[in-house]
Image (tube, helix red, strand yellow):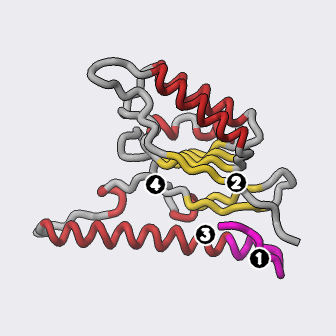
Amino acid sequence: MHPPTLRILHTSDWHIGRTLYGHHRYAEFTAFFDWLYDTIVKQQVDILLVAGDVFHTTTPSNKAQQLYYDFLCRVAASSCRHLVVTAGNHDSPTFLNAPKELLRVLNIHVLASLPASPAEEVLVLKDQAGEPEAIICAVPFLRDRDIRTAAAGQDMDDRERDLVQGIWRHYSEVCAAAEEQQQSARPAGDDHLQG
């Protein structure tokens, strides 16, 4: 017997609140969210992934925030079981993280900044019966200060090398944590958990 197929929709770079030549584009954002919601419903999406740059600035307008939260509420009320939001370089980690505990009640998972441990970036999403159905590595935008320690006397090449090594090390730690979760979440003899 084959496990049910999960439908995952990945999106990013919404840049809510971005203007064009000084003109607000809220009608365009509203049309986009209507289209995205209709797609989620028609395609029976189970998991929506939003990979960064939700807002265009770190201080989004009230209207931009309203569009974002209205959309999250619509998706939470749909058949889409999980919504995962990670921050991008345009997003304020503090702003996105502020309502994360409240949003978690709606199965909306927000990772806007690096947590204390890479294992916290590994989300085990569960089906309606409470069984694990997917493992998501939700890594927010990695800021230089989060993954590299500056040392006196470093030249540009040294800093670049340290940054690349820091990114590699971080993703390796997240992947290792995901593999651990996959092994512990998988019942003996069952290899259907998608990760």
Q: Quadrant of residue 110?
A: top right
Disc 1 or disc 2, which is closer to the eye?
Answer: 2
Q: Residue at x 59, y 40 (%)?
A: 100
What residue is at 59 percent from the left and 32 percent from the top?
35
Q: Amino acid at mark 2?
A: Arg
Q: Which residues are magenta?
A: 182-195
Whether residue 189 is visible, yes or no, is yes
Q: What residue sits 65% from the left and 67% below the top? A: 195
Q: How many marks?
A: 4
Q: Which numbered mark, 3 or 4, is in the foreground of this view?
A: 3
SS type, badge 2: loop
Q: CA distance from mark 4 to mark 1?
A: 30 Å
Residue named by callout 1? 191
Few, some or many C-alpha atoms within 10 Å of disc 3 (few <14, some 14-19, many ≥20)? Answer: many
Q: Which residue is mark 2?
A: 7
Please tell me which residue is depicted at 48% across the width and 45% down the height of the picture.
12
Closer to the chain start, of discs 1 and 2, is 2
Q: What residue is pinned by disc 4?
A: 114
Mark 3, residue position: 178
Q: Residue flagged by tag 4: what amino acid is it? A: Leu
